């Protein structure tokens, strides 16, 4: 029969130093934060693409330009009042342009993980002024091309 060694009362065997444990836990937390931000970015980017596509499909592509412009203005007022500055008229127009420039949802899904609209800092997740950071179309197309290479 093999006897197990038992640590004296009050002493816990330490497998890893406290500093190393802290570093490992910090790394785990940072990786998880980055993954969460990436998933949120992707979801928000797809949401904004869907908003732009829906407006384009339902209002503007039905050849009601003057009426459509007023509807977009009204939508921006209501949406920004309820959901904040990401839905201002300027941003709705950018969402519409984005949906028009990239009509294929599969491409947008791939691209959405690479767009930078959110940032993480010590206070948590910050939503940036969404479309003011959107790179030029050629740069976006290059990112798409590289992601399929």
Image (spheres, rainbow, N blue to C red):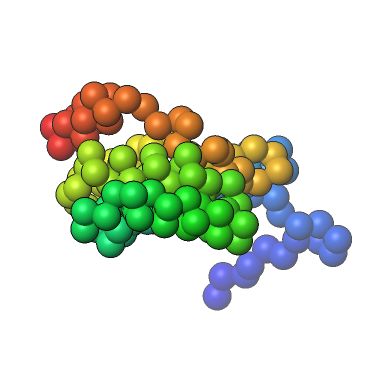
Q: Could you say which is closer to the camera, residue 59 or residue 66?
A: 66
Relative to residue 94, is residue 117 drawn left or right?
A: right
The part of the image, by quadrant, that contains residue 43 is bottom left
Query: Which quadrant would residue 149 be assigned to in this image?
Result: top left
Closer to the camera in the image, 95 or 56? 56
> What is the number of callouts on the image?
0
**Which residue is the extreme one toward the front?**
66
Asked if residue 138 lies left or right of residue 8, the reply is left
**Depth order, front residue of 102/25:** 102
Q: Residue furthest right?
A: 10
Rendered view: 142 above or below 59: above
The residue shown at (65%, 46%) is: 124
Give the vertical position of 55 relative to 120 (above or below): below
Where does the image place residue 64, in percent across and percent down from the top left? 27, 55
Q: Where is residue 16 in the image (x, y as percent from the top left)?
A: 64, 45
Residue 139 lies left or right of residue 13; in this view the side is: left
Seen at 16% across and 31% down, the residue is 145
Residue at 86 percent across and 61 percent down: it is 10
Viewport quadrant of the N terminus: bottom right
């Amino acid at each position: 029969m093999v006897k197990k060694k038992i640590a004296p009362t009050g002493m816990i065997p330490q497998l890893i130093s406290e500093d190393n444990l802290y570093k490992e836990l910090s790394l785990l937390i940072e990786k998880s934060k980055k993954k969460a931000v990436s998933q949120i970015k992707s979801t928000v980017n797809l949401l904004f693409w869907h908003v732009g596509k829906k407006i384009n499909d339902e209002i503007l592509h039905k050849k009601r330009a003057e009426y459509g412009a007023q509807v977009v203005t009204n939508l921006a007022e209501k949406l920004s009042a309820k959901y904040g500055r990401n839905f201002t008229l300027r941003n709705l127009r950018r969402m519409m342009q984005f949906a028009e420039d990239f009509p294929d949802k599969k491409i947008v899904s791939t691209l959405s993980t690479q767009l930078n609209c959110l940032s993480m800092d010590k206070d948590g997740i910050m939503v940036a002024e969404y479309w003011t950071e959107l790179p030029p179309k050629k740069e976006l197309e290059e990112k798409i091309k590289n992601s399929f290479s």
